[in-house]
Image (spheres, rainbow, N blue to C red):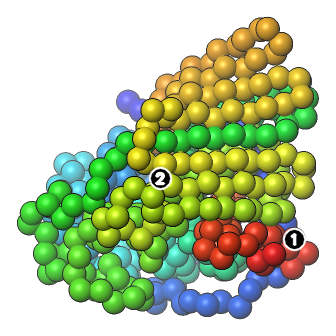
């Protein structure tokens, strides 16, 4: 049987690993409203109470998390919502094998209105994260959300303020924080034994192919994807399976590789160093290879400078994956290299310490979320970390689009173009 309990000491230790977020600031005026949901009193969970959870958004990433969530013995997945009928029915069948009374919904608003829930897990397209999070926390429900938490720094502040006002537990899906390998890196970095951090260099290249409507599900239609529910309040387009199934490649729904790939490595840098917001972000990018209808760049680079006097340098192209993925941390007294998020070397002079990993698993991150729900403590990827990472990704997009540097104004808690 899977263990789903933790001692008090382990729970508090996990919470202590959470990186510090941005300084608290007065909130910007709200720019969007959450979907209307009934106000309910949050249920106090005892150590033996089963968690009633729902899943919203069950594409490729969502299916992976759902499969992991279904292995928890004290969590019932009582409902699912997705606008694509095939995804929803497939997920519902999986849930019913464990919880026969599970129910499926097209609209997440209907799910939140009709179900009595303790938590939701959401892996919708990125532009739908905010309405799901706001509607859930307003209804007294805790939230596990895939990253990025939001697409803009303004909405990140709005979500932060609403989550804090509701005293909700939130876990952002930056699951690298729950890997023992990166927790070992955090211990070493914060011990000071490697000296001062000078630069973090992340290169993540890959090989991909052109977007092709022939590669989208043949049975998908405007009707069974419920296309208007996908578009929500973004610009109207006629039904397009490329936009629906490859939404990460379109600017209305995604911050491209800054919000998708860079954010993972940037967030883990924040986690291991405990740094604050970068003072300035400079970024460039464009479509260099794939003129296939996408609107997000296929090649990007970003340089972030931090007040702690170190740089974070990131680059990605998906036209040539020869060099793959590496993360390098350069200190005055040592060096760290992480290869493919699966093996790490810590160099102290001529001595090399190798640290392996068990892989990038969903279960430890979910476990931390469920434990935090019971203890009402901070998760390992809390709201401030979500705000910080989402804001940095948006700053990169702002810089790339404007040709100017994006600066963080810590005194007023806002981003400006320099």
| Quadrant holding the C terminus | bottom right
Residue 122 visible: no
**Is residue 284 rendered to the left or right of residue 65?**
right
Q: Look at 38% across and 30% down and name the residue there.
A: 1
Q: Position of residue 234 (x, y in %)?
A: 42, 86
Relative to 287, residue 19 above or below: above
**Is residue 125 rendered to the left or right of residue 95?**
right
Q: Look at 76% across and 83% down and name the residue there.
A: 27
Q: Which residue is mark 2?
A: 49
Q: Residues within 10 Å of mark 1 (few under 14, many from 20)?
A: some
Inter-mark Cα distance, 1 to 2:
42 Å
Q: Look at 56% across and 27% down and name the residue there.
A: 339
Q: Are marks 1 and 2 in contact (CB under 8 Å)?
A: no
Q: Residue furthest top?
A: 350
Q: Residues within 10 Å of mark 2 (few under 14, many from 20)?
A: few
Mark in the foreground, 1 or 2: 1
Dot label at residue 410: 1
Which structural element holds mark 1?
A: loop
Q: Position of residue 134 (x, y in %)?
A: 54, 78
Nearer-the-camera pick, 62 or 238: 238
User: Reading the chain from its start, which is encountered first: label 1 or label 2?
Assistant: 2
Instruction: Tally the numbered discs.
Output: 2
Q: Look at 14% across and 81% down and name the residue there.
A: 223
Nearer-the-camera pick, 138 or 209: 209
Residue 269 visible: yes
Dot label at residue 277: none
Relative to 164, residue 212 above or below: above
**Is residue 101 rendered to the left or right of residue 337?**
left
**Is residue 122 rendered to the left or right of residue 181?**
left
Q: Position of residue 190 (x, y in %)?
A: 84, 34
């Amino acid at each position: 049987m899977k263990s789903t309990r933790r001692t008090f000491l382990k729970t508090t230790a996990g919470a202590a690993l959470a990186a510090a977020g941005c300084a608290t600031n007065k909130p910007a005026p709200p720019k969007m409203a959450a979907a209307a949901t009934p106000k309910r009193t949050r249920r106090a969970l005892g150590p033996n109470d089963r968690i009633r959870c729902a899943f919203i958004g069950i594409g490729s990433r969502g299916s992976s998390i759902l499969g992991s969530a279904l292995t928890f013995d004290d969590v019932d997945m009582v409902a699912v919502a997705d606008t694509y009928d095939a995804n929803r029915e497939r997920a519902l069948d999986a849930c019913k094998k464990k919880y026969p009374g599970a129910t499926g919904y097209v609209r997440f608003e209907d799910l939140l209105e009709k179900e009595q829930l303790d938590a939701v897990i959401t892996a919708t397209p990125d532009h739908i994260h905010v309405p799901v999070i706001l509607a859930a926390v307003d209804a007294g429900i805790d939230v596990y959300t895939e990253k990025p938490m939001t697409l803009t720094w303004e909405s990140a502040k709005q979500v932060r303020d609403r989550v804090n006002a509701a005293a909700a537990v939130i876990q952002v899906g930056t699951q690298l924080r729950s890997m023992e390998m990166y927790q070992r890196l955090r211990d070493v970095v914060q011990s000071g034994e490697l000296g001062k951090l000078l630069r973090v260099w992340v290169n993540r290249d890959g090989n991909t192919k052109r977007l092709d409507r022939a590669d989208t599900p043949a049975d998908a239609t405007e009707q069974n994807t419920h296309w208007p529910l996908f578009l929500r309040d973004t610009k109207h387009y006629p039904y397009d399976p490329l936009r629906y199934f490859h939404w990460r490649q379109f600017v209305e729904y995604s911050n491209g590789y800054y919000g998708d790939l860079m954010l993972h490595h940037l967030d883990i840098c924040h986690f291991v160093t405990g740094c604050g917001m970068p003072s300035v972000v400079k970024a460039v990018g464009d479509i260099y290879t794939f003129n296939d209808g996408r609107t997000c760049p296929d090649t990007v680079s970003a340089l972030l400078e931090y007040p702690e006097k170190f740089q974070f340098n990131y680059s990605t192209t998906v036209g040539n994956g020869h060099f793959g993925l590496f993360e390098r941390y350069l200190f005055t007294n040592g060096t760290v290299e992480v290869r493919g998020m699966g093996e790490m070397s810590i160099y102290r002079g001529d001595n090399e310490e190798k640290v392996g990993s068990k892989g990038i698993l969903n279960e430890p991150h979910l476990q931390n979320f469920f434990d935090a729900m019971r203890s009402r403590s901070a998760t390992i990827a809390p709201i401030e970390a979500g705000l910080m990472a989402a804001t940095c990704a948006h700053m990169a997009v702002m810089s790339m689009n404007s040709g100017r540097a994006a600066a963080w104004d810590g005194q007023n808690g806002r981003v400006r173009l320099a």
